[in-house]
């Protein structure tokens, strides 16, 4: 897949209803995207898989859902007001703006070819907003730039109610906002995005062990989404790359057409966040260590992933082109766990009782799987549409169905079709998807 392929993904996403540009009818808003009917299903599948694997299938991780708006002191205490900056430079000639750490300042401006840069200045990434009707500075706060702080400020509330013992985790999924200097590569870097974050509270002396454990667990999770192993890697951060709160960090990276890039960070945040809130807030957040009869501040290993980046990775990794009988076939080889539609149902023609039988099968499949009923256009075109939507299976009701009560079950990747009894479709799908 070459660098231009991101354009192909953008085009397929629009054509099939995965992603639309935000506010398109008004000319669009740069780097903001809307999830369409297929997009929202696939995004929900990714989020549900994360929630199941992180929260509901584990005994010692609980979930929560904090507000996007928080007290402004949270961001003072967390260090975001002071430290959540990126260095920015402008080209004096054409006014193009770049992140100083993303370009070589001895080289020419990509846009105009001149080498005339402003000095780098620090730019805070948090979006300011005002609370209430009067926009005076006393009522200012921020849209959260990470979901994690909602977990830290609720640490005691969760400990007191969920009765967990160290080590235990608190997980949260939700929107975050950053006024990024440069955006781009479709969903990769946007100003509004969703995070899936889990803070794992531990004895401080165990941080190395749990950092290794969660790095592997999270890498395996991306493999479970069906992403090719050879396109994934774990990379340890150099000291100069670490965020202001972290002492060690791994990135899970994927090899995109634009290079290896971060999908998730697994960071040792130490006791930084709880210590900071303990310094600034009215209520202390500690954990009572019964064995030693003392209050301690636990350390934290954080696993922080972007939903939209996971979504983009699934699309890029699944995109496939091939030639079939002299025609191009485009398909998304999405894992059935992630695909927005599991099975499409097609009557071969729109008469002779075939639509009625198809509808009956569709209704039955829909009780367990995401299904799509398609009776418009030639059967070849309908198959191609579903290939592009990434639908792993298709069931076709044809004339033979009327004679022997069988239907065809088509496999997206091999295009192989087998005949199965029409009352066994649900059972066959269950077998394939277990
Ligand atoms: N709480 C830690 C934290 O927020 P981060 O590395 O800044 O760490 C975590 O962000 C993840 O959130 C990233 O790995 C990425 O997947 C996602 N993310 C961050 N900024 C993003 C942006 N501008 N657009 C899309 N996703 C973003």
Image (cartoon, grey):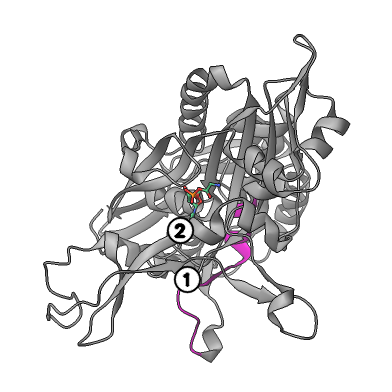
Task: Identify the image quadrant of residue 303.
Answer: top right
Label 1 residue SS: helix
Q: Position of residue 77 (x, y in %)?
A: 63, 52
Determine if residue 32 is in view.
yes
Q: Is residue 111 left or right of residue 362?
A: left
Segment tinted magenta in the rendering: 27-44
Q: Position of residue 360 (x, y in %)?
A: 77, 51
Q: Which residue has dot 1 on it?
A: 15
Q: Is residue 254 left or right of residue 420?
A: left
Q: Separation of disc 1 and disc 2 at Cα?
A: 9 Å
Determine if residue 345 is in view.
no
Q: Is residue 20 left or right of residue 234?
A: right
Q: Residue furthest top?
A: 291
Q: Which residue has dot 2 on it?
A: 388
**Magenta segment includes 38:** yes
Q: Residue furthest bottom?
A: 26
267 or 407, nearer to the observer = 267
Task: Identify the image quadrant of residue 328.
Answer: bottom left
Q: Is residue 211 above or below residue 416?
A: above
Q: Position of residue 16 (x, y in %)?
A: 51, 66
Q: Is mark 1 within 8 Å of ligand 1?
A: no
Q: Residues within 10 Å of mark 1 (few under 14, many from 20)?
A: some
34 or 265, nearer to the observer = 265
Q: Is residue 223 above or below residue 390?
A: above
Q: Earlier in the sequence, mark 1 or mark 2?
A: 1
Seen at 20% across and 87% down, the residue is 93
Whether the residues at callouts 1 and 2 have beta carbons within 8 Å, the answer is: yes
Q: Position of residue 256 (x, y in %)?
A: 32, 51
């Amino acid at each position: 897949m070459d660098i231009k392929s991101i354009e192909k993904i953008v085009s397929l996403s629009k054509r099939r209803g995965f992603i639309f540009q935000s506010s398109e009818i008004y000319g669009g808003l740069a780097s903001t995207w809307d999830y369409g009917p297929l997009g929202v299903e696939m995004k929900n599948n990714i989020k549900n898989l994360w929630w199941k694997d992180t929260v509901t299938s584990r005994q010692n991780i609980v979930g929560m859902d904090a507000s996007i708006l928080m007290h402004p002191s949270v961001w003072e205490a967390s260090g975001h007001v002071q430290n959540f900056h990126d260095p920015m430079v402008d080209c004096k000639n054409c006014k193009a703006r770049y992140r100083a750490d993303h370009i070589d300042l001895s080289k020419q401006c990509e846009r105009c070819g001149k080498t005339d840069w402003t000095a780098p200045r620090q730019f805070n990434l948090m979006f300011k907003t005002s609370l209430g009707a009067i926009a005076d500075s006393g009522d200012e706060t921020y849209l959260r730039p990470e979901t994690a702080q909602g977990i830290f400020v609720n640490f005691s509330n969760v400990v007191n109610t969920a009765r967990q013992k160290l080590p235990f985790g608190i997980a949260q999924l939700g929107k975050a906002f950053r006024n990024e200097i440069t955006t781009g590569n479709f969903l990769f870097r946007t100003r509004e995005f969703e995070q899936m974050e889990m803070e794992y509270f531990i004895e401080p002396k165990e941080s190395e062990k749990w950092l290794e454990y969660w790095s592997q667990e999270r890498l395996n999770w991306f493999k479970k989404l069906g992403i090719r192993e050879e396109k994934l890697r774990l990379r340890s951060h150099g000291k100069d790359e670490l965020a202001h709160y972290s002492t060690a960090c791994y990135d899970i990276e994927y090899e995109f057409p634009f290079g290896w890039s971060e999908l998730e960070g697994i960071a040792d945040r130490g006791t930084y966040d709880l210590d900071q809130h303990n310094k600034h807030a009215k209520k202390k957040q500690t954990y009572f260590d019964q064995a030693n009869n003392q209050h301690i501040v636990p350390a934290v290993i954080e696993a922080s992933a972007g939903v939209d980046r996971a979504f983009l990775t699934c699309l890029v990794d699944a995109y496939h082109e091939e030639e079939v009988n002299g025609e191009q076939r485009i398909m998304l080889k999405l894992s059935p766990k992630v695909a927005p539609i599991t099975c499409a149902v097609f009557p071969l023609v729109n008469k002779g009782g075939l639509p009625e039988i198809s509808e009956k099968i569709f209704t039955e499949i829909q009780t367990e799987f995401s299904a799509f009923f398609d009776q418009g256009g030639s059967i070849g075109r309908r198959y191609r549409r579903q290939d592009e939507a990434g639908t792993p299976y298709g069931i076709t009701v044809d004339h033979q169905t009327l004679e022997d009560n069988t239907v065809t079950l088509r496999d997206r990747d091999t295009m192989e079709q087998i005949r199965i009894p029409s009352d066994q479709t649900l059972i066959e799908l269950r077998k394939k998807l277990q």
